[in-house]
Image (spheres, rainbow, N blue to C red):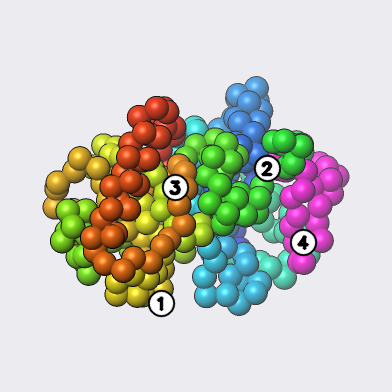
Amino acid sequence: MKIIKIELNSLPLKIKPTVACIGYFDGIHKGHQKLINTALKVAKKEDLPTSLITFDPDPWVVLKNLKSVSHLTTLKQRINILNSMGIDYLYLVKFDKELSKLTPDQFVRELLIPLQIKSLVCGFDYTYGHFGNGKASDLLKYPEFKTVVVKAVNYRKEKISSTRIEKEISNGNFTMVNKLLGYPYQTSGKVIKGHQVGRTINYRTANILLDEEYVLPLDGVYCGWIRYDQKFYQAMINLGHNSSFNYRQQHSLEVHILDFNQDIYAKKLTVIWLKKIRDEKEFSSPAELKKQLVKDEKVVRSYLNNRKAMLSYSQGA
């Protein structure tokens, strides 16, 4: 997949005609996947390459003057997924104040038409232009390209959306999250130095500094997998403030990797979240903490050994 960075004042570019789909695609969940697969089918029928138009930074950063926005996936993760799905070109459009002020008609004529789109695939609820005044149905009037509007993908009579998935993550309901995504939720980061309490009770943990502002669940203990050096390992995952020892104001993400004894300081790990085990607790002593961790380990091993975790669809780290 070829990545082409685009700024409004740099158009037109010398690019090939494509069948394109458009959106922000955070998470690339099952709804997004239907959109992308529709574009792939149209492109095959029309014998054209495919492109996906997305924006960087997140439009909310510009529209609401935010420093950062929590996401389901990083840009790198989205690129890896799109590449694996077979998209030929990724048009990474710089979202700035100038772009945000375009009327819907200007958005089409100054951005979409110069991109040499022959067919445009979008969701039924896609909006564009200043204040989102342009609707998906409005795109049907432009003769320069065909527009294919994709209906909602529902699960249990409710639309699959990034917002719905974010709510389920916040509740720690990863069984539902992973059904809506179509693959297990993943966060990546680098191992940093911690307080090393775990090694005193034979439960060494890796403290992970996440790459970006991911959407994270409620504090607690979770079971899942760690991907390191292209291999998968069972893991106990703790998210919280380390309230028993060395309380931290900021969230701390720690993982105990089962049956693992490698030096991974400063290495990159991917955490794959599968199920919440319990809430975070306070312990009066390291011995009491160890007693609980032994119980947690039994639960984690039982859960992971009796189920096939969805590991085939990797987002990359």
Q: Nearer the viewer, mark 2 or mark 4?
A: 2
The CA distance from mark 4 to mark 1 is 38 Å
**Residue shown at 69% from the left, 49% from the top:** 113
Counting from the top left corner in percent of width and height, residue 291 is at 28, 53
Amino acid type, residue under disc 3 in the picture: Ile
Amino acid type, residue under disc 4 in the picture: Gly
Upstream in sequence: badge 1 or badge 2: 2
Q: Residue 175 falls in which quadrant of the image?
A: top right
**Residue topped by disc 4:** 132
Closest to the observer: 20 or 106?
20
Crowding at label 1, few (<14), some or many (≥20) Cα neighbours within 10 Å? few
The CA distance from mark 2 to mark 4 is 20 Å
Taking the image as shown, residue 140 lies to the left or right of residue 86, namely: right
**Magenta stretch?**
119-145
Residue 169 visible, this orientation: yes
Helix, strand or loop for disc 1: loop
**Residue topped by disc 3:** 277
**Residue topped by disc 2:** 160
Closest to the observer: 127 or 260?
260
Helix, strand or loop for disc 3: strand
Q: Nearer the viewer, mark 4 or mark 1?
A: 1
Is 137 magenta? The answer is yes
Taking the image as shown, residue 249 lies to the left or right of residue 172, namely: left
Crowding at label 3, few (<14), some or many (≥20) Cα neighbours within 10 Å? some
